[in-house]
Amino acid sequence: MLTTKYLDIGEDMNVPDDFTQSELQTGKWWRHLLAGGIAGAVSRTCTAPLDRLKVFLQVNPTRENMTKCLAKMINEGGISGLWRGNGINVIKIAPESALKFAAYEQVKRLIKGEKNNQPLEIYERFAAGATAGAISQTVIYPLEVLKTRLALRKTGQYSGIMDAARKIYAREGLKCFYKGYIPNILG
C-alpha cells in the first residue's frame, strides 16, 4: 500500500511532506503549488461574500440579522460589492502558499541536519510547520490588513488595491499594516 504524508499549510491547502528526488528534479512539485493556488483562489472567490459578511458583522455594532446586513451591503455596493476585498485575497494566495512551502522546506532541512535521509518525527514536523506559517504570515499580513480594509470600504473610497495601500499608509503609517498581527500569529 502506497501512502504519502501531507503537511497542512493552513486553511484548505496541503502539500506532500516530502517530495521524491524525481519530483524535485523534474519540477513536478510546482504542480502541487499551482493546483493549490488555483483551488485556493476559486475557494476564496466562492466564499468571499460570506467572508465580507463576517467582517461586516464583526465591526458594525448592529443587532440586525445576517439577511438584513447582507441587504445593507447589496444596497450600498450592489451585488458585486459582496466580493469587495476578494481581489487581494486571490492575489495573496499564491505567494502565501509559496512562502509557507519554501519556509517549511528550509526549516525541515535545518531540523534534519545530519540525519538527512530520515523522516521527521511528528513534533519536528509540527515545529517546521508552525515556523513556516509564522514566517509566511509575517510577510503576507499587510495584504490581510488591506483585504479587510478593502472589504469594509465605502463605494468610491479607494480606486483599487494600490490606491488603498497609499492612502492607508499616508494616513496611518507603516505600523497600521500589522494591526492585529499578534492575535493572528497566535491563532
Image (cartoon, rainbow, N blue to C red):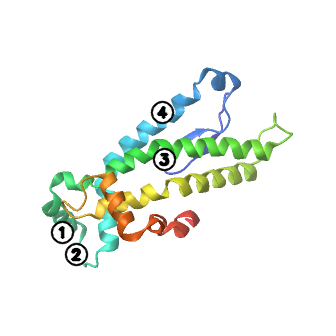
Say left or right for 28 vs 40: right
Q: Amino acid at mark 1?
A: Lys
Estimate the x, y position of residue 120 in percent, counting from the top left: 76, 44
In the rendered image, which residue does mark 4 sit on? 34
**Disc 3 residue crowd, few under 14, some 14–19, many 20+, Cα 10 Å:** few
- Residue 137 found in image quarter: bottom right
Estimate the x, y position of residue 2 in percent, counting from the top left: 67, 28
**Disc 4 residue crowd, few under 14, some 14–19, many 20+, Cα 10 Å:** some
103 and 64: which is toward the camera: 103
Q: Secondary structure at mark 3?
A: loop
The residue sitting at the front extreme is 170
Tell me which numbered mark, 4 or 1, is placed earlier along the sequence: 4
Estimate the x, y position of residue 134 in percent, counting from the top left: 60, 57
Q: Amino acid at mark 2?
A: Glu
Q: Secondary structure at mark 1?
A: helix
In this view, 83 is above or below 22: below
Cα distance, mark 3 to mark 4? 14 Å
Q: Amino acid at mark 3?
A: Asp
Estimate the x, y position of residue 9 in percent, counting from the top left: 57, 47
Q: Are marks 3 and 4 in contact (CB under 8 Å)?
A: no
Tell me which numbered mark, 3 or 4, is placed earlier along the sequence: 3
In the rendered image, which residue does mark 1 sit on? 68
Marker disc for residue 64: 2
In the rendered image, which residue does mark 3 sit on? 12
**Image depth: mark 3 or mark 4 in front:** 4
In this view, 78 is above or below 100: below
